[in-house]
Amino acid sequence: MDNAVATVAINAEACSSSCDLCVASCPVDILRKPEHGSVYVAYPDDCQACFLCEEECPREAIRVTTPARVPMIDVVYAQSSSEKGR
Ligand code: SF4
Ligand code: SF4
């Protein structure tokens, strides 16, 4: 994961087992759908953070997170925790 520009997470409860739209949308082919199983991220380091999989997902079951997309509340909390630790 050290080389990844983004983290790709799939919510297994929300994901539909009959769907593979995110797999088809990924331009670098890092997602896989086994014949009898759920979609998973096979090559997480290769994600290009294009967000196409998120846009295609009808259930909001896949989430791509980059450092720039970390919610501001998390940044504030991290700064606050770090200052307390000084
Ligand atoms: S963000 Fe783009 S490159 Fe990354 S998994 Fe989704 S479709 Fe593939
Ligand atoms: S597009 Fe969404 S619902 Fe379909 S397989 Fe991917 S994560 Fe699951």
Image (tube, rainbow, N blue to C red):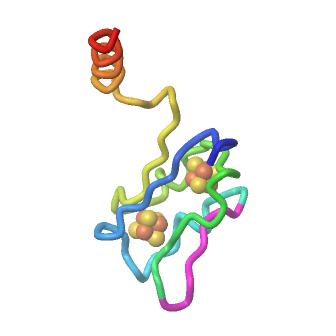
Give the camera-side residue of 20 and 6: 6
Q: Is residue 22 magenta?
A: no
From what the image shows, is residue 68 above or below residue 38?
A: above
Please determine whether, in this image, residue 51 is positioned above or below residue 59: above
Tell me: 16 left or right of 19.
left
Q: Residue 80's image quarter? A: top left
- Image: 46 above or below 71: below
What residue lies at 41% left-to-right and 30% top-to-bottom? 70
Q: Nearer the viewer, residue 29 or 5?
A: 5
**Residue located 57% across and 42% down the image:** 6
Q: Is residue 52 above or below residue 42?
A: above
Look at the image and say whether residue 32 sits in the magenta stretch: yes
Tell me: 60 left or right of 66: left
Work out whether residue 50 or residue 65 is closer to the camera in this orientation and state it.
Answer: 65
Q: Position of residue 28 (x, y in %)?
A: 72, 57
Q: Most prominent secondary structure in the magenta stretch?
A: loop
The segment highlighted magenta reads 29-36
**Count of marks overlaid on the render:** 0
What's the residue at 30%, 67% (across, down)?
14
Q: In the figure, residue 12 lies in which quadrant? A: bottom left
